[in-house]
Amino acid sequence: DVQRALEKAGEALEEVLEMREAVERAKEESVRRLHTLEIEIGFKLHDAQARVAALSEALERSEVLRTATEEESQQSHDEAEELIRDLNTENQELTDNLGSEQQLRVQAQRQVDALKIALEVQQRKAEQLGPILSTSNTLQNTAIHH
């Protein structure tokens, strides 16, 4: 009986040792996987931080562009209003002083020509500002969605 008990104890001890080895192998595998995950997470975190920094920078540039565009647009608007006021003043002075129909026609044509020039200037500025506003809006939308 003692011999049999010793054999069973030996078998149980072998099983325990095998289980211990299996647990050690599983533990080592888990440590390797954990280390691999830590590295992957580190890369992904670094990538996300770089993207956030790039988006932040793009948003800042977008805001600068938007502000510059608004200022340029306001300046163009102010210049056009000033030109119209000047033309109206000049027209009134000519109407008051000249009285001649021929001179009024000449002045009216000058005003039409000046207004055409002002309109062309406004259109050119609008064409120049269009892509800037589009880029600014795209950058802001991209920054907002990310």
Image (spheres, rainbow, N blue to C red):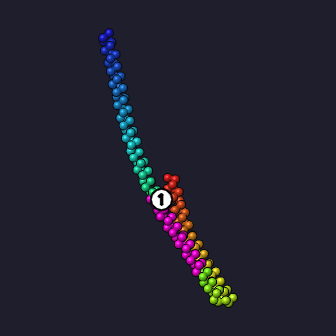
Which residues fall within the magenta stretch? 57-86
Q: In the figure, 126 relative to 25: above or below?
A: below
In the image, is residue 69 part of the stretch drawn in magenta? yes
- Asked whether 20 or 76 is in front, the reply is 76
Amino acid marked by disc 1: Leu
Question: Residue 32 appears in which quarter of the rendering?
Answer: top left
Q: Residue at x 53, y 59 (%)?
A: 138
- Asked whether 20 or 111 is in front, the reply is 111
Where residue 134 sits: x, y (%)? Answer: 55, 63
Q: Residue at x 55, y 74 (%)?
A: 78
Mark 1 crowdedness (10 Å alpha carbons): few <14, some 14-19, many ≥20: many
Q: Residue at x 69, y 88 (%)?
A: 101
Res. 113 visible in picture: no
Q: Residue at x 34, y 16 (%)?
A: 8
Where residue 33 sits: x, y (%)? Answer: 39, 38
Where residue 63 sits: x, y (%)? Answer: 48, 62
Question: Residue 3 appears in which quarter of the rendering?
Answer: top left
Question: Residue 115 appears in which quarter of the rendering?
Answer: bottom right
- Asked whether 41 or 82 is in front, the reply is 82
Left or right for 14, reference 106: left
The residue pinned by badge 1 equals 59
Quadrant in which the N terminus is drawn: top left
Res. 126 visible in picture: yes
In the image, is residue 73 part of the stretch drawn in magenta? yes
Q: Secondary structure at mark 1?
A: helix
Q: In the figure, 19 relative to 54: above or below?
A: above
